[in-house]
Amino acid sequence: MTKIYLSHNNIISSYGFSSTDAVEKIKNGISGLELVNDKSLMPEPFYSSLVNKKSLSEESKALNLGEKYTTLEKMMLLSLNKVISDSNFVITERTGLIISTTKGNIDALDIRSPHNEEKAYLSKLGKSIQDFFGFLKEPLILSNACVSGVLATSIAKRLIKQDLFDDVFIVSGDLVTKFIVSGFNSFQALSSEPCKPFSKNRTGINIGEVIASVLVTKKSTNLAEEAVIIMGDGTANDANHISGPSRTGEGLVRSVNSALKEASITAAEVDYISAHGTATIFNDEMEAIAFNRLNMNKIPLNSLKGYFGHTLGASGLLETIIGMHSMHQNTLFTSLGFDEMGVSKPVNIIEESIEKNVTIFLKTASGFGGCNTAAIFKKVKH
């Protein structure tokens, strides 16, 4: 059976322009969230994690990224360039590209934007990335709410197994924009303080800004030290509500069971769960119910939203990459913001970073429209 690997990776975030920058801060329990007072985004201050735009400008000059590229495109090009460079990769007809985002260049529709509003079409975003690097095949644009990032790894795996590609690059990301912030605020879902996933005292979500990239490959050579094998995945839609998840966790349960079946393992063999954990009542409760139904309530679990906020289309891939580094370092990171259990079913929240030999971890994600995705990853023995 062909093994499919997640290998070289990059994260651009409020922590800096590399995965290492983010992992080191997370390991030390440092949040990337801060109070943002920007009336062009929202009338009131709100907590978020934003990429430093001055640093972005400096990094962009090194790649000669001119004004024709949007802010999101510049971030994606920088992140993906780092992965391509680190992997010493030469793009061929057997190389695929997946772009994962929920809103893409939505800021191009702002009256103040210097870019033509046609930039808001996701196909235009894909074309910009494709042309810059010279990908020979048209990119796949994946926009399935907040499961998009982890779903991209599943689709990349399937494309390689179907022998359509030997390697697939994924770049995922969303900006913090007025459109997105006002949208979540209209749901009364934004928190006025740093989010607290699974906690009794949570008051809602924070929106974050991140770009994440990874190489998915069937080649077992020149892998990153933190590389993992994609053992199995599953996606299911609970069809409950346009924005609210199933109260029974049915979609998540089915997606995890599908991933376990493909991976040929039992729930007891999972060492760690990287949950979605948005810090909303409905999401946290649904996940707790689902993990209890799956007999996974005793497995160590965290949410990384307390570090980055909810990064939408990037969240699933971002948190997968952090999980890769966590497993490589045999360290489970604190579920930042958690204070007192706030769900009806017991789950084993990681309250302090601990050293633990981790071989297999589960990444889950859930999103608007009832979508749920789960993927299981295994450490590579070099």
Image (cartoon, rainbow, N blue to C red):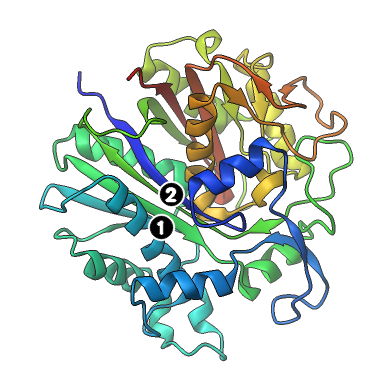
Residue 345 is marked as none
Quarter of the image with the N terminus is top left
What residue do we see at 21% from left, 32% from top? Answer: 218
Give the mark count. Answer: 2
Q: Give SS at disc 1.
A: helix
Q: Earlier in the sequence, mark 1 or mark 2?
A: 2
* The C terminus, quarter of image: top left
Q: Which residue was labeled with disc 2?
A: 10
Give the quadrant of residue 46.
bottom right
CB atoms of marks 1 and 2 within 8 Å = yes
Evaluate whether residue 35 shows in this view: yes
Q: What label does residue 79 carry, if any?
A: 1
Q: Residue at x 84, y 49 (%)?
A: 203
| Residue 319 versus residue 122 in the image, above or below | above
Q: Is residue 348 left or right of residue 58?
A: right
Which residue corresponds to the image point at 70% horizontal and 38% vertical from the top-left?
A: 28
Locate residue 277, reporting x and y percent: 67, 39
Q: Is residue 64 above or below residue 237?
A: below
SS at mark 2 in the image: strand
| Image location (x, y in percent) of residue 268 | 55, 8
Q: Residue at x 25, y 69 (%)?
A: 132
- Which amino acid type is marked by label 2? Asn
Camera-side residue: 29 or 188? Answer: 29
Direction from residue 142 to residue 328 in the image, left or right: right
Task: Identify residue type, mark 1.
Answer: Ser
Number of residues whose C-alpha sits closer than 10 Å to that of mark 1, classed few (under 14), some (14–19) or many (20 or more)? many
> Badge 2: few (under 14), some or many (20 or more) residues near its Cα, within 10 Å?
many
Query: Does residue 304 show up?
Result: no
Residue 2 found in image quarter: top left
Per the model, the C-alpha gap separating discs 1 and 2 is: 6 Å
